[in-house]
Image (spheres, rainbow, N blue to C red):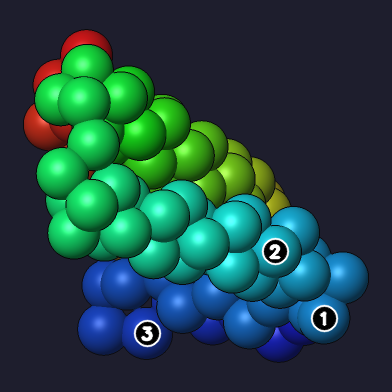
Amino acid sequence: MADSELKDGRIYLRRTDEERKPILQRLNRIEGQVRGLRAMIEEDRYCQDEVQQINAVTAALREVALIIISQHVSEGIELASQGADNSEAIHDVMSVLRSAMRFKE
């Protein structure tokens, strides 16, 4: 990560273009899936097809969340090992993980 920082008890990621690119690519794909879902609804497609598209979008968003969580945890460990306030870095990582655990399978 480029110049990430621990500020006010929060880890602020400063992603490089290389780190940002796969997230943005996935989000672009998800936008297309949502537009496809909108078209399916407008065309009154079969409900099971619509639900399958919703499930695909949901799974794709979970994958984006996992990438973001992975980056956050990695950066938190890195900041803590470089002498940043360990308790603040760990607290913030735990806060992000708690948020992520609210996902329903």
Is 35 left or right of 82, judged from the image as shown?
A: left
Mark 2, secondary structure of its residue: helix
Could you classify mark 2 by the number of other residues whose Cα lies within 10 Å: few (under 14), some (14-19), or many (20 or more)? few
Which is more foreground, mark 3 or mark 2? 2
Which is more foreground, mark 3 or mark 1? 1
Q: In the figure, 13 relative to 92: above or below?
A: below
Q: Nearer the viewer, residue 8 or 57?
A: 57
Tell me which corner region of the image, top left, top right, bottom left or bottom right, holds residue 103.
top left
Sequence-first tag of 3 and 2: 3
The residue that mark 2 highlights is 25
Label 3 and label 1: CA atoms lie apart by 22 Å
Q: In the figure, 82 relative to 15: above or below?
A: above
**Residue drawn 31% across the image and 59% down it:** 39
Sequence-first tag of 2 and 1: 1
Mark 3, secondary structure of its residue: strand
Q: Do the residues labelled 3 and 2 touch (CB within 8 Å)?
A: no
The residue that mark 3 highlights is 7
Mark 1, secondary structure of its residue: helix
**Residue drawn 15% across the image and 44% down it:** 44
Sequence-first tag of 3 and 1: 3
Label 3 and label 2: CA atoms lie apart by 29 Å
Residue 86 in view in this figure: no
Is 85 left or right of 5, judged from the image as shown?
A: left
Q: Are marks 3 and 1 in contact (CB under 8 Å)?
A: no
| Image quadrant occupied by the C terminus | top left
The residue that mark 1 highlights is 17
Tell me which corner region of the image, top left, top right, bottom left or bottom right, holds residue 47.
top left
Is 100 left or right of 81, judged from the image as shown?
A: left
Label 2 and label 1: CA atoms lie apart by 12 Å
Residue 50 image offset from top left, x and y in percent: 25, 33
Q: Nearer the viewer, residue 22 or 102?
A: 22
